[in-house]
Amino acid sequence: MTSLDLHKRRTAAVARGVSSVISSYVDHASGGTLVDVDGQEWVDFASGIAVTSVGNSAPRVVAAVREQVERFTHTCFMVAPYELYVSVCETLNAVTPGELEKRSALFNSGAEAVENAVKIARHATGRPAVVVFDHAYHGRTNLTMALTAKNMPYKHRFGPFAGSVYRVPMSYPLRDGLSGAAAAARALDIVATQIGADNVAAILIEPIQGEGGFVVPAPGFLPTLATWAREAGAVFIADEIQTGFCRTGSWFASSHESVVPDLITLAKGIAGGLPLAAVTGRADLMDAVHVGGLGGTYGGNPVACAAALASVETMRELDLAGAARRIEASMVGRLRALADRDPRIAEVRGRGAMIAVEITVPGTLEPDPLTTAGVSAECHRRGLLTLTCGTYGNVLRFLPPLVIDDETLSRGLGILESAFEATA
Ligand code: PLZ
C-alpha cells in the first residue's frame, strides 16, 4: 500500500477536519528518523509535536509496555487501583519544580489536564476568573478553546465558548521590545482594572509558548506574574505540556527562571508517545477538591503509566536535559549563521531542543507566512519533517527527539539550510 493509495482511502474514511502536515504515511520510526510506506526516510524535527523526546519505540518504553500489556490493560483507577498510578504520581511530585508537598492526578490528553487544573484552581479559591495570554495555546475542548488565543483553525465557528476567561498581552521581546517587568506591569494593569485581583482564580501560562510561536518571554516576566499570583491568592498554573520533560534543556521550563508553579500541567513528553497527562502541584490546592471530584475512565491507564515510568528513567539515565542543551548549541549556532545570510529570518529563539526561526518581510516585522510555508514544504520535499507555528503562521519550529544522534541532527540542519537557499 503506497501513500497515494492510503490517501485515497483516507479521503473516503477520515473526517476532513482532521488534517496532516505531510501526505506520506509512516511505516516505522526510531530516535530521529521516520520511514514512510514508500520507503523514504525522513529526519524527524517534529517528535509528533514534542512527544517522543525519548525517541519512537524507545527500548525501555517498549519493554515496560510489553510487560504491562500482558499483566492487565485496564481496570480504571477509580474502580480498582494499581501501583503504577501511584508510582507515576510519586515520580511527578519528585521531578517537578519546588521542594514542597505535592499531589498529582492523571488524565489522557493535554487539554484534559488544563481543564482539570482550572477546575482545581476555581474549586480551591472559590473564584471564577482565569487569566490567559495573547498567542496562548491550551487545547481544543470547549474550555481550552476559550483559553487558546488563535481563531483559525482551532476556534472558528466552534463557539460559544466557556466564560470568565480574560486575555492579556504576552511578553514578546521581538515585537514589543519591553523588559519582563514592564510587560508584566502592562498585563497586570489589565487584570487589576478589568477583572479585579480578588476575582482571579488562576493565571495560566506556557513558560515558553508552543503553538503560539515559541515565544520566550523577557526575563522577569514569569517571576513577576508568579509573585503577583501568590500575593493575590490566585493560583499560578504553568502549562508545561510542550516544554516539559527535558525539552528545553531543564526538566521543566519554569526552572530557567526559578519559578515554582502552584500547579503544572503535563502531557506530551511524559510517556514516550502513549497517551497520558497530569496535573501536579501544591498538596493544599490539589486536596481541596472533594473525594470523587476528579477522574475519568482512562486517566492513568496502566500501560501508559508503565511507559511514563520507563520514559522518565530513560531521561535520567541518558541525561536528556543535557542532550537538549547540546542540541540547542548546534542548532542555534547554525541557525544564527543562516540568519546572518538570510534577511527573511528576523529572529532565532527558543531553549534546548525547542528552537524556532521567525520569518518576516526583510527589514520589517511584517509576518511572512507564505515564505514560511514555502520553506517548510521545501524541507518536506528534501526529507526533513518540520512544523510551523505562530499566530501569523510565520514561525518555523524544530522539535527533534532528544535522543537524536549528531549525524542525523547535522543532516537535518543541512536540509534546512538548503531549503532556505532553494527558496531565496
Ligand atoms: N497545552 C502548551 O502545546 C498541545 C496541539 C496540536 P493535547 N499542542 C499541540 C493541535 O493542533 O491540536 C498542547 C500544548 C499546550 C495544551 C495542549 C493540548 O494538548 O494533548 O493536544 O490535548
Image (cartoon, rainbow, N blue to C red):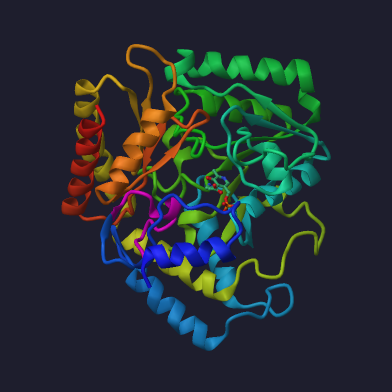
Magenta-tinted stretch: 43-56
Q: Residue at x 53, y 28 (%)?
A: 223
Q: Is residue 48 magenta?
A: yes
44 versus 359 height, above or below: below
Q: Quadrant of residue 340?
A: top left
Q: Quadrant of residue 421?
A: top left
Q: In the picture provided, is 61 more to the left or to the right than 154?
A: left
Q: Quadrant of the C terminus?
A: top left
Residue 157 at what x, y percent from top left? 72, 39
Q: Is residue 1 magenta?
A: no
Q: Residue at x 54, y 66 (%)?
A: 88
Q: Residue at x 38, y 78 (%)?
A: 63
132 and 321: which is toward the camera:
132
288 and 206: which is toward the camera:
206
Residue 141 at what x, y percent from top left? 69, 49
Residue 262 at what x, y percent from top left? 62, 42
Q: Quadrant of residue 145?
A: top right
Q: In the picture provided, is 227 more to the left or to the right than 41?
A: right
Q: Can residue 219 be seen from the camera position used here?
A: yes
Seen from this angle, which residue lies furthest left?
407
202 and 5: which is toward the camera:
5
Q: Residue at x 55, y 74 (%)?
A: 84
Q: Can residue 352 be seen from the camera position used here?
A: no
